[in-house]
Image (spheres, rainbow, N blue to C red):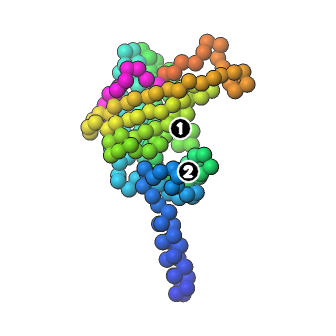
């Protein structure tokens, strides 16, 4: 390799590195094709299998840290480290809803940004016809405990935007009551 080639590779490497930014970078400061990185190493402590029992409902969360997934938000497209949440909900021991086997591209709960070193905000795309879309705040409160707060938003459904709406309605099975649900590992 000649000196010119080495010099060009060096500058390309520096240019790529300069587009890295921390996860909590303000949306206005994110450029297309940039890369948001977990520079503070916040995400690993959230990764794992977590469970909670709420009445007759058993909820299992599987949280994975992934790197460099493509994010398309508004008019911007960039790459980010993220937490993906897959879940399984059982009622009286019977599986009622599960996303455990979904590929990363189909996971509907993804981290938006860390609020601080121990709290991460997630966006949930919703279930059938986007019912239940909203935000979830997960707080790390110890090596074996997470606190979960899910705020589902309302949806206006019509036959045009939800032609397969079931006759008996759609239940939101992710736990949103009571507040501050504790999951353990």
Quadrant in which residue 137 is drawn? top left
State if disc 1 and disc 2 touch (CB < 8 Å).
Answer: no
- Nearer the camera: disc 2 or disc 1: 2
User: Does 180 lie within the magenta span?
Assistant: yes
Question: 31 or 163: which is nearer to us?
Answer: 31
Question: 103 or 183: which is nearer to us?
Answer: 183
Which is the main secondary structure of the residues drawn in magenta? Answer: loop
* In this picture, residue 65 sits left or right of residue 33: left
Tell me if mark 2 has few (under 14), some (14-19) or many (20+) residues whose alpha carbon lies within 10 angstroms of its own: some
**Image quarter (top left, top right, bottom left or bottom right) of the N terminus:** bottom right
x, y percentage for residue 76?
Answer: 59, 51
Mark with earlier residue (2, 1) = 2
Q: CA distance from mark 2 to mark 1?
A: 13 Å
Residue 173, compared with residue 16, is above or below; it is: above
Whether residue 67 is visible, yes or no, is no
Q: Residue furthest top?
A: 168
Q: Which residue is mark 2?
A: 70
User: Does 85 lie within the magenta span?
Assistant: no
Q: Residue at x 35, y 48 (%)?
A: 42
Q: Residue at x 47, y 33 (%)?
A: 135
Whether residue 33 is visible, yes or no, is yes
Residue 175, compared with residue 77, is above or below; it is: above
x, y percentage for residue 39?
Answer: 38, 56
Question: 121 or 91: which is nearer to us?
Answer: 121
Quadrant in which residue 160 is drawn? top right
- Residue segment shown in magenta: 174-185
Residue 180, compared with residue 114, is above or below; it is: above
Q: Which residue is mark 1?
A: 107
Q: Residue at x 51, y 76 (%)?
A: 11
């Amino acid at each position: 390799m000649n000196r010119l080639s080495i010099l060009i590779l060096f500058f390309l490497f520096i240019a790529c590195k300069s587009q890295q930014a921390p996860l909590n970078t303000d949306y206005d400061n994110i450029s297309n094709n940039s890369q948001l990185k977990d520079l503070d190493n916040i995400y690993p402590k959230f990764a794992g299998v977590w469970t909670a029992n709420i009445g007759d409902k058993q909820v299992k969360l599987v949280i994975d840290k992934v790197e460099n997934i493509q994010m398309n938000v508004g008019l911007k497209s960039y790459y980010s480290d993220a937490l993906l949440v897959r879940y399984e909900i059982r009622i009286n021991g019977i599986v009622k809803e599960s996303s455990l086997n979904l590929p990363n591209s189909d996971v509907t709960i993804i981290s938006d940004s860390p609020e601080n070193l121990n709290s991460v905000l997630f966006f949930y795309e919703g279930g059938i016809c986007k019912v239940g879309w909203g935000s979830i705040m997960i707080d790390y409160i110890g090596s074996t405990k997470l606190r979960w707060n899910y705020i589902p938003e309302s949806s206006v459904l019509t036959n045009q935007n939800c032609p397969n709406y079931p006759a008996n309605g759609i239940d939101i099975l992710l736990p949103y009551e009571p507040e501050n649900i504790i999951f353990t590992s």
